[in-house]
Amino acid sequence: MQSPDVRDPHWRVARSDELLRETQRQAERPGEPDLRRICDWLCRHIDAHVALVWSTGTVAATSAGFPRAVLSALATRLPGLGGGRGVVAGLEAGGLHLRLEALEPQPRPADPRARPAAPGGGGTGPRPPRPVLVVASAAPLAREPALLASDTARSALLLLRLNEAAAVHRNYQHKARQVRFAVLQALLAGDPDLARRMTTGAVPELLDARTLRVYLLQCPPGERDRLALVLQDPSGYHDRDLMVQCPVIREHLICLVSEDSDDDRAPAGRGAELCRLAAGSAGYAVGISAVHALEDTSQAYEQARHALAVARNLPGAVASYRGESPLAQLLPRPEAVEWARSFLRPLAGAPRLTPQILRVGLTVSRSGAARFLDVSRNTVAAHFRRAERLLGLDLDEVTSRALLHLALALADPPPPATARTGTAPTVCELIRARPAAAWAAAFLHPLDDTLRTTARAWVAANANAQRTARDLGISRNTVRARLRTAEALLNRDLLTTGFGSYDLVHAFAIAEGRAAVVREGFLRTS
């Protein structure tokens, strides 16, 4: 330590400038304040030991070599300062002069171990703890060093309050993000009323809309979080829209944009803003769904995912969904529902979470399903194994996944006590129906012979590009390039998550019956 030259009229001004720069440096960086650095700085300039403690006795930081034994002498004084009986106090302990300066109390202590001190007199309840600056010196501080100590105490308080405010802000943003994701989950489950009930008192404006369109934006993860924050309104939503960070793919921002009409022409408002952003920024792309009712948000999201797979390979990086409707929407009712319930009957006794895990896990990776549903990967794997055992399927096979995906798109597993209602139709009977045949022909029509042969071989090879290349005698890159072309023509995601392959499986099964592409895997399990 060095003795301060308090006779220099510029001494405190120079020290105050240093303190200001250090305070500004710490305020601008993320994370908790470096109180030890501030204590060491003050220690060097006033020739005294320095500590910052809570009025509860918890030590926040000390300068190097601080004689901690003197803190025991403060045991009876610190609670009094915390109770508001004094602001600056002095005493002697261990041959040192101690100067205690209590700062304003925090609304909530930055130190999670700190607890409110018992009231020291007056008042009716516990008071929040106060940070106290303790200066231990061989002689009482002169006026200038004492003033510098007070300035330093106020700077430390400022940093503590900034850290507290940042923690409150982070907690608010975390909660707002959780609420937005919960609203999205309710809409994906087709239950806008649930979304309204869970946000009672702060219902997002989106839930007042009649229809919406989903924009799935791909961008760098840091930009995704920045966009969601910059466009956020004070309520934690995004005005009449909702932007949700995808928990599965860090580059995806799911944007639910309210629509006032069914017009599928060029988007306006938020949608146009997202399109301009994607078209003018490297690493960005956006897939856009058609207009859907709120109850059909899951269909809109699937369309946006398919469109994004196309947008990634377009010069403008923007694509709207223009593909055929999924097969499940075209199969005859109630026959298709009867088949699905019969097919899923073995799951009647399974946990209620099983169908939900299967639905998500069939459209993303199993680790992604775990993140989306906030369960462990082992839990997802266990539910898949149970479903395989009960249904007699190998869910590592794309044909089995396609069949289960179709059934779950049509119905839920029946309750355990539900009685059978006669003989349900088979999937073979369903796909022979005229609507299914017309759908398959329209779905495959954009593919020329080369693309159709490649896609057929890819399905037969269990959606494995390397095996497809070997079977066709071409390179793996050629296979993937052809499948990318097929993605754009079919408006289906074949290579990123692969859940667009299910419609391809169904289309070939319908168009070619028991052709080798599906062997008996698709039809036998029906």
Image: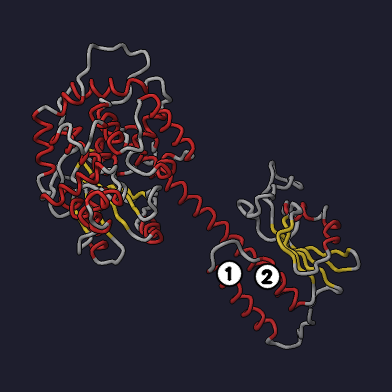
Q: Earlier in the sequence, mark 2 or mark 1?
A: 1
- The residue type indicated by label 1 comes to Gln
The residue lying at 23 percent from left, 34 percent from top is: 519
Pointer 2 local density, CA inside 10 Å: few below 14, some 14–19, many at least 20: some
The residue lying at 43 percent from left, 47 percent from top is: 176
Q: Is residue 407 above or below residue 234?
A: above
The residue lying at 30 percent from left, 44 percent from top is: 205
**What colour scheme was applied to this rendering of the protein?**
secondary structure
Tally the marks. Answer: 2
Instruction: Identify the image quadrant of the C terminus.
Output: top left
Residue 195 screen position, x and y as percent: 35, 36
Q: Is residue 129 above or below residue 297?
A: below
Quarter assignment of residue 131 = bottom right
Is 467 left or right of 15, judged from the image as shown? Answer: left
How far apart marks 2 and 1 lie (CA) works out to 10 Å
Is 54 left or right of 486, judged from the image as shown? Answer: right
The circle on residue 274 is none
> From where the camera sits, is residue 215 visible?
no
> From where the camera sits, is residue 171 visible?
yes
Q: Is residue 404 above or below residue 469?
A: above
Query: Label 1, on which residue?
Result: 26
Residue 521 screen position, x and y as percent: 27, 32
The residue lying at 57 percent from left, 56 percent from top is: 164
Task: Please tell me whether mark 1 sits on a helix, a strand or a loop.
Answer: helix
Query: Label 2, on which residue?
Result: 37
Residue positioned most to the right:
95
- The residue type indicated by label 2 comes to Arg
* Label 2 close to label 1 by CB (< 8 Å): yes
